[in-house]
Amino acid sequence: MKLLYGVQATGNGHISRARALAPLLKQKGVEVTFLFSGRESKDFFDMEVFGDYKVKTGLTFQTKEGSLDVINTVRNVNLRQFKKDVNDLDLSQYDLIVSDFEPIVAWAAKKRDRECIGIGHQYAFSYDIPHHKNVLGSFLLKWFAPSNKRVGLHWYHFNHAILPPIIINHSALVKADPKKVLVYLPFENPKLMINTLNAVKHYDFIMHCKEIEPGKYGNVIVYSFGLESFQHNLGRCQSVLCNAGFELNSEALKLGRRILVKPLQGQMEQHSNVVVLEALELAHSATVLTAEVIEEWLETSKAVQIDYPDTAACLAQWLSEGAVEPISNVAEELWAEVDSFSANTCYDSAILN
């Protein structure tokens, strides 16, 4: 079986999901061609697992000082190149086409009337689930990377055929230090963030950032990007300070970490994630990160751990068999394994109304 797998590479979460699936699909004998868009080739790292992958320009968004920059986003869209990439993409050799919110693959499939399997967090919003109300955001979630077979992922199923998160397994965990905090805030000003963290005493902050030279800055240690170092630091930090994306927060919940999120302002998905995280009491959120806010969170919050099942292995099996089984069956099977979380149903009526 040959599979074309498109991955939106603007953030690392989509790549992380594909990274978890890649070796499993290979074990099943599925020949996968990965296509990444939304990031320059020079900014990819630790990509060996994807073999001879393709990189296209695609569509992405621009940010400024922790907010979505709509003007620069529109200004940087290259619709001519996007249309060319969609028209030039040869789908004839592939048995299955998958998009993790990647628009070139999704639109190429739509243009040729081919089935496109949308796998990712964004596809969960095609169901009636709690979310931040935003007309433009809802439109983009529907049409950015359209699919006619949707496999949504979320922290809870909300009584729909939504799957648990795809999470990379941490093979060698160290004991988490309650005084260490992992910081991953790629949309914030890193220099200002370091100054803020320096004002929070009695904690050590492990910050992954590409704009600041790696090194020690007071009680902040800056690391460059790298899969191995990031996973090691996530394993040894008891707390996680990050944006309100999906993948890192899923890993943090699986490991049982305290979480404080700051949503990317103007980005519907992240604001919607805050709605769910707070309603389910899985994490705290803040619209502005001050030393006082961070310190209060560290001193008063408690961690939540959810032992999510191996969604990646289940999906790899499903894809290798042609993706014919109803996804509702797959969802039911996976959520049945999340006993500790599923048993706590006291929030159901509140979050669904």
Image (tube, rainbow, N blue to C red):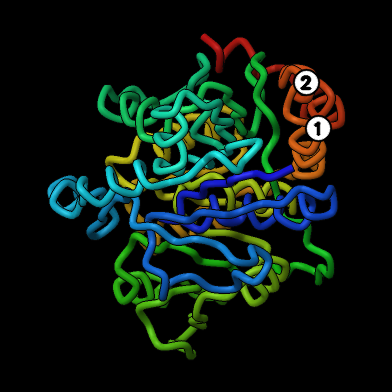
Whether residue 178 sits left or right of residue 106 in the image: it is right
Q: CA distance from mark 1 to mark 2?
A: 8 Å
- x, y percentage for residue 255? 74, 54
From the viewer's perspective, tell me whether residue 81 is left or right of residue 193.
left
- Asked if one can make out residue 307 in the rendered structure from this viewpoint, the answer is no
Bin the neighbour count of mark 2 within 10 Å (Cα to Cα): few under 14, some 14-19, many 20 and up.
Answer: few
Q: Nearer the viewer, residue 107 or 64?
A: 107
Graded by Cα atoms within 10 Å as few (under 14), some (14 to 19) or many (20 or more), the crowding at tag 1 reads few
Q: Report the side of 313 relative to 297 (left or right).
A: right
- Viewer-nearest residue: 134 or 116: 116
- The amino acid at mark 1 is Glu
Residue 26 placement, left or right of 238: right
- Please give the residue where the numbered disc 2 appears in the rendered image: 325
Q: Amino acid at mark 2?
A: Glu
Q: Quadrant of residue 307?
A: top right
Q: Residue at x 70, y 34 (%)?
A: 164
Check disc 1 and report the residue beneath it: 321
Front residue of 205/15: it is 15
Label 1 with label 2: CB-CB less than 8 Å:
yes
Q: Secondary structure at mark 2?
A: loop
Answer whether residue 56 is visible to the viewer in this image: yes
Mark 1 or 2: in front is 1
Q: Position of residue 32 (x, y in %)?
A: 66, 51
